Amino acid sequence: MAEGTSDASGPAVFLHIGAPKSGTTFLQSLLWDNPGVLAEQGVLLPGGSFDAQVRATRDLRGLVPEEGEPGGDWTGAWDAMAAEIKDSDARIAVISNEVICAADADAAARVVRSLAPLPVHIVYSARDLAGLLPSEWQEYVKHRFHYDFGQWLDEVIDGPRDEAAAEWFWLVHDIPAVLGRWSAHVPPERVHVLTVPRPDAPRTLLWERFAGLTGIDPDSVDVGSGRPNSSLSWTETELLRAVNNAVDDDVPMWLYHRLVTDLLALQVLPGQGPSGRVRLPADRRAWAEVQAKELVEAVRRAGWHVVGDLAELLPPEQAVTDEENRPPERDAIVEAASHTILTLLDRIAGLRQEVGVLSAELREQRGTALPKLAARRMSERNPAVWRLRVGYWHMVERLKGIEPPPPPADGEAGEPGVRPRLTRRAAG
């Protein structure tokens, strides 16, 4: 049977379980930006949104909402999604969430049981450790971790694997352990290890591999529109650590995620500081090389289907020296903080402007007769009605003996709605 097809009365299910920091955001953005194109190829994205799949994943893992978390009741979300898939006449169904790999053996059994008799495929995307470790430290910082890279490495590499930062890291990145939880329920030919290409590979390659596995036409979507989970520079990461140190301990995680992770870390901070990626220190590379070889051998022994090249999981040569790979000075962090504050103020100004416009429209609606308001709204949507209104207005002005004012000369009036930016970069 070819990949991406099902011999049962229903779609084959491709469960992209992670791992974090392995191109998952890029693949998910391509999927959710193109649901119509994919539907034409028989691809179902169950739930109808990425958020719905996240909620189903939380239900699957048995997570409990925090007190006061908006929309926090996801009880039954997984079973509802499984029922949607089983009722579908699609060719395949794709679920992608990078933390499904943290599901325990009972949750893995529940997935396969709830989707039976449909064939379930497990897709695990994996990345070389030398690139993964710095990216994962940044991801920890984006989720409130406030220790420096050195301490994080000490916990992950030298500490017990079931404590501190190491607990989550190995829960999701120990490939044989993660896939072993699924192998009891899914045959090896339906467990797929998708290797992440080297940074110098074509940007399209990861998508081409994923699409080829699922039977999607890789050229049917604009790969250039895919949004990666961009790494922060070292300066930006250190600034975020400082923010984390200042966040009150009583702030719930759901609120932290909304304001700090989603807004500050993902939208505002990137590009505010000087470039300079965090890299694995030279004294940790020998460990990474040995560990990577052990993971690769474990994949080979298990007989799982490899999409890509296992050699891509081995650390590449590193040209950067430890002298160049150093934390930023305080002045660089302060400068990045200044740019960040200005960008946030600029966003606040924009929001205030939008609120002002909406408030004015609301006041106008309350003070305008309904027939007149309806005519105005219709003219705004219909060019012919708009021209009729303008012509009527000019006729009334002429009858009153009032000529409409002449248009402003070039340069006498700025474009309406344009607001100067506060950022230094915009000023030149």
Image: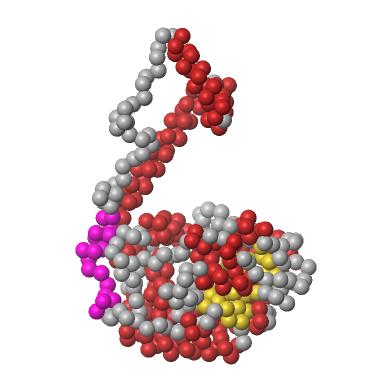
Which residue lies at the image location 27% right of the left edge and 60% below the top edge?
336
Comparing 239 with 402, the one in front is 402
Comparing 60 with 231, the one in front is 231
The answer to whether residue 183 is left or right of residue 231 is right
Query: Compared with residue 403, is residue 76 higher up or lower down, i.e. above or below?
Result: below
Query: Compared with residue 392, is residue 242 higher up or lower down, i.e. above or below?
Result: below
The magenta region covers 323-339
Residue 350 spot, x, y in % from top left: 38, 43
Residue 1 spot, x, y in % from top left: 73, 77
So how many labels did they put on this image? 0
Residue 172 seen by the camera: no
Query: Compared with residue 393, is residue 281 higher up or lower down, i.e. above or below?
Result: below
Which residue lies at the image location 36% right of the left edge and 45% below the top edge?
348
Residue 39 seen by the camera: yes
Would you say residue 288 sits in the magenta stretch? no
Comparing 34 with 288, the one in front is 34
The answer to whether residue 316 is left or right of residue 208 is left
Q: Quadrant of residue 305?
A: bottom right
The answer to whether residue 235 is left or right of residue 303 is left
In the image as oriented, which residue stretches furthest toward the left?
331
The answer to whether residue 253 is left or right of residue 344 is right
Query: Compared with residue 384, is residue 29 higher up or lower down, i.e. above or below?
Result: below
Would you say residue 335 sits in the magenta stretch? yes
Residue 293 spot, x, y in % from top left: 47, 89
Which residue lies at the image location 41% right of the left edge and 72% below the top edge?
135
